[in-house]
Amino acid sequence: ISEEFHRITSKDLLGTFGAAFDKHVPCLLKLYRARKGALGQKTSWKNLMK
């Protein structure tokens, strides 16, 4: 899959995925922690994405 991705896009799949993942990790962790700690409390999506 990685070689085919590189052939089509001329980019490294793992590098591209890693960069995108690193970009989104802080928001994903914030979302996970908010949902984990909510225990029945409603959380606003707008507040989570700030």
Image (cartoon, helix red, strand yellow):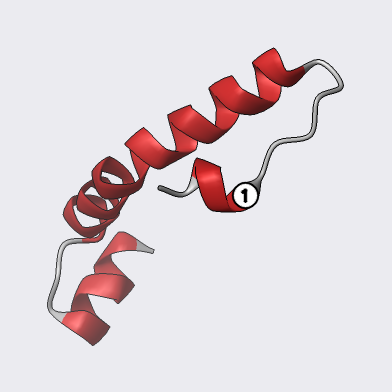
Q: Is residue 14 above or below residue 16?
A: above
Pointer 1: what residue?
45
Name the quarter where the N terminus is drawn: bottom left
Callout 1: helix, strand or loop?
A: helix
Q: Residue at x 81, y 25 (%)?
A: 41
Picture coordinates of residue 48, whole percent (x, y): 52, 42
Q: Residue at x 17, y 52 (%)?
A: 15
Q: Residue at x 45, y 28 (%)?
A: 29
Number of numbered discs on residues: 1
Picture coordinates of residue 36, whole percent (x, y): 68, 18
Q: Amino acid at mark 1?
A: Trp
> Looking at the rendering, which quadrant does residue 2 occupy?
bottom left
Q: In the shown orientation, is residue 9 left or right of residue 35?
A: left
> Looking at the rendering, which quadrant does residue 31 occupy?
top right
Q: Is residue 20 above or below residue 38?
A: below
**Along the viewing direction, whichever of 43 and 27 lies nearer the viewer:** 43
